[in-house]
Image: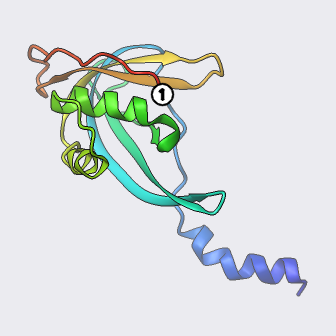
Amino acid sequence: MSKWEDTLQQFNESYATSEARSTWAPPPGKYDALLTDVDRTITEQDGVAQPRWSIKAQIIGGEHDSKEFSMGTYTPKNFGMLKSLIATLTGEVINDLSAADEALKAVPGMAVALTAKKNPKGYTNFYVNAIIDAGGAAPQEAAPEADA
């Protein structure tokens, strides 16, 4: 067996049990969605550890009902967007990163009204406009958007 084949064999079980990631995103528009998960990990960039949060959601109602998608990944590169999202979800600007992380732990189960927009690179960005109840009751006012 070649070194290549041996290396592939070593990682075969890990590959076989890996979950294929969906790249589906709703088309541009306004949606109600249930925030379903916040994955918190530490990654390394240029040898420096950094926090990363990935938020998943599921469409509520309409043509794409129950479809799951990734709302995005937040790292130090886009802290402004993360801070705006947390402000919308909590109703306050949180300036301490540990407190912001605690707030994100409470996100699964929240229902939101959001807007999906394509950016110039063709990726879909999501903007939470308001917190809603799962039945679509009157939303809370959204916090202003911040630049990343």
Across and down, in percent, residue 3 comes to 87, 83
The residue that appears at 33% across and 48% down in the rendered structure is: 38
- The answer to which image quadrant residue 90 occupies is top left
The answer to whether residue 11 of the structure is visible from this angle is yes
Across and down, in percent, residue 103 comes to 21, 45
Q: Judge the density around disc 1: few (<14), some (14-19), many (≥20) Cα neighbours within 10 Å.
A: few
Which residue does the numbered mark 1 point to in the structure image? 148
The residue that appears at 57% across and 18% down in the rendered structure is: 119
Note whether 95 is above or below 141 in the view shown. Answer: below
At numbered mark 1, what does the secondary structure look like: helix, strand or loop? loop
In this view, which residue lies farthest toward the bottom? 1
Q: Is residue 145 left or right of residue 106?
A: right
Across and down, in percent, residue 1 comes to 88, 87
Q: Is residue 11 left or right of residue 62?
A: right
Note whether 48 is above or below 111 in the view shown. Answer: below
Q: Nearer the viewer, residue 86 or 96?
A: 96
